[in-house]
Image (spheres, rainbow, N blue to C red):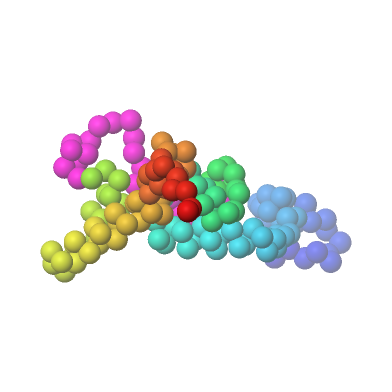
């Protein structure tokens, strides 16, 4: 539709087609490899932790030695059309009393084949919750790391 070699200026061609000039003149730039790597890692982490928002995703990156800002993570998640599976509002829900609130995104939204399948899933979640999932109340540490940090150091003989 737009002919860049035509004598009619691109802005006039865009106006005749009722397109914004910026959408016609803008040429997309490829993303840097580092940004693509972070986006890929966010995708993997979101698959493992569908309940994680930008803060937890940022903490998960930090635990792997990757320093990235929360706003950058939020922007990339929005660009990738990723949202946290569970968002808590300021309301108190009746379901908060019935279910384990942290497990709702991981355990309660799955279909199970039986009791043993549900127990296995809950076990995987608790393992993840205690060993991989950073908690903001613990300074972005896992409960396991917070517990081990408070144990007295054993001196080597």
Q: Is residue 152 left or right of residue 73?
A: left
- Where is residue 156 shown, x and y percent of the image? 48, 53
Q: Is residue 41 left or right of residue 146?
A: right
Query: Does residue 53 show up?
Result: no
Task: Examine the rendered structure and indicate whether residue 137 appears above or below residue 37.
Answer: above
- Where is residue 23 shown, x and y percent of the image? 68, 53
Q: Is residue 61 left or right of residue 103?
A: right
Q: Nearer the viewer, residue 93 or 68?
A: 68
- Where is residue 100 shown, x and y percent of the image? 23, 45
Residue projecting furthest to the left: 115
Residue projecting furthest to the right: 7
Query: Does residue 86 show up?
Result: yes
Residue 3 is drawn in which quadrant?
bottom right
Quadrant of the rendering where the N terminus is positioned: bottom right
Residue at image position (64%, 58%) is: 35
Residue at image position (33%, 30%) is: 90
The tally of labels here is: 0
Residue at image position (40%, 51%) is: 133
- Where is residue 22 shown, x and y percent of the image? 71, 50
Residue projecting furthest to the front: 157
Q: Main secondary structure of the magenta part?
A: loop
Give the magenta part as a residue range.
Answer: 75-99
Q: Is residue 80 magenta?
A: yes
Task: Examine the rendered structure and indicate whether residue 96 appears above or below residue 117.
Answer: above
Residue 95 is drawn in which quadrant?
top left
Residue at image position (79%, 56%) is: 10
Task: Examine the rendered structure and indicate whether residue 8 appears above or below residue 56.
Answer: below
Q: Is residue 17 magenta?
A: no
Q: Is residue 29 left or right of residue 79?
A: right
């Amino acid at each position: 539709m737009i002919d860049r070699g035509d004598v009619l200026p691109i802005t006039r061609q865009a106006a005749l087609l009722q397109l914004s000039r910026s959408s016609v003149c803008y040429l997309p730039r490829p993303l840097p490899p580092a940004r693509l790597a972070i986006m890929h890692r966010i995708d993997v982490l979101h698959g493992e932790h569908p309940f994680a928002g930008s803060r937890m995703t940022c903490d998960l990156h930090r635990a792997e030695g990757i320093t990235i800002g929360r706003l950058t993570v939020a922007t990339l998640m929005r660009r990738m059309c990723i949202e946290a599976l569970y968002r808590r509002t300021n309301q108190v829900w009746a379901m908060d009393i019935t279910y384990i609130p942290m497990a709702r995104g991981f355990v309660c939204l799955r279909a199970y084949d039986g009791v043993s399948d549900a127990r296995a899933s809950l076990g995987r979640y608790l393992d993840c919750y205690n060993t991989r999932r950073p908690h903001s109340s613990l300074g972005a540490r896992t409960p396991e790391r917070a517990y081990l940090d408070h144990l007295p150091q054993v001196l080597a003989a």
